[in-house]
Image (tube, helix red, strand yellow):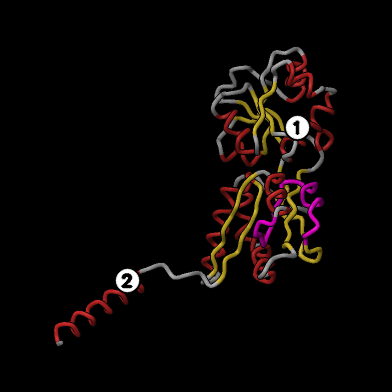
Amino acid sequence: MKRISVWLLTAAMLLSLCACGGKAEPAATLTVFAAASLQETLTEISTAFEAAHKGVEVVCNFDSSGTLKTQIESGAVCDVFISAAQKQMDELDCVAEDRHMDLLENKVVLAVPDGNPAAVVDFADMAARLASGELFLAMGNADVPVGQYTQKIFAHFGLDEATLAADGCLTYGANAKEVTIHVAEAMADCGVVYSTDAVSAHLTVVDTATEAMCGRVIYPAAVLTASQQPELAQKFLDFCRSEAAMEIFTSVGFAPAV
């Protein structure tokens, strides 16, 4: 009988030690859907937010803004949405209007692989050589912001995307990160990407699109009406606008939206 009691006591102590050594369950989990171009910076900022708010876990889902919008519309759990363009935000009817802000501004750039093998000069040179079938360009799909900005650049230079695609001058990426990879791995002569992705991937930038070419690149952010913890979600957005967070954003080329 004594042996059984000792064994039970030992087992109880082991279970207690295991429980103490295990990772505690978070008191709250915040789910953030964010444009793929935010992956590096927002991951770092989320870690800093968790450190400042004990018991909170931030779970980020990064993809193209169009894909994220579709997931939200399909009922995916999401507290905060940060888009790479206003279009995808405007198309959602679950945005809390009093918890909506323009968070960041980015730039659209023309990037080339290491060494610039095709000797691409700038956007005007890109347009002329695409029209003559001399270049192979990487761009985003039509349903993602970086692709939509590229389409505006095409329109600015009088290029027809369908014709370029039929002539085999274009390759597509499902989001900004995929386009960046196409350029980094020299799968294309050049690519239209965000300035921040070019910085993160150490790409060579040969030109920056003007506002006349594609408009301003604003990243709106909002708490969704379906959020079960809107106050915490708002605290996260406020944290993203803090000086510490902005230092992380600006380190790769983002600017606060004005």
Residue reaching furthest to the bottom:
2
The mark closer to the camera, 1 or 2, is: 2
Quote the CA–CA distance across marks 1 and 2: 54 Å
For disc 2, the neighbor class at 10 Å (few under 14, some 14 to 19, many from 20) is: few
- In the drawing, what numbered circle is on residue 246? none
In reply to whether residue 191 is colored magenta, the answer given is: no
Q: Which amino acid does label 2 sit on?
A: Cys
Is 244 displayed left or right of 108 in the figure?
left
Residue 120 at x, y percent in the picture: 67, 20
Residue reaching furthest to the front:
1
Residue 117 at x, y percent in the picture: 58, 18
Name the residue beneath numbered marker 2. 18
Q: Earlier in the sequence, mark 1 or mark 2?
A: 2
Residue 197 at x, y percent in the picture: 61, 39
**Which image quarter is the C terminus in?**
bottom right
Q: Residue at x 79, y 19 (%)?
A: 163
Q: Which of 147 and 242 is in front in this view?
A: 147
For disc 1, the neighbor class at 10 Å (few under 14, some 14 to 19, many from 20) is: many
Q: Which amino acid does label 1 sit on?
A: Thr
Quarter of image, res 212: top right
Residue 28 at x, y percent in the picture: 56, 70
Can the viewer see residue 111 in this picture?
yes
Q: Residue at x 69, y 23 (%)?
A: 170
Is 244 displayed left or right of 151 in the figure?
left
In reply to whether residue 86 is colored magenta, the answer given is: yes
Name the residue beneath numbered marker 1. 150
Can the viewer see residue 256 in this picture?
no
In this picture, which residue range is highlighted in magenta? 75-95
Q: Residue at x 34, y 70 (%)?
A: 21
Give the secondary structure at mark 2. helix
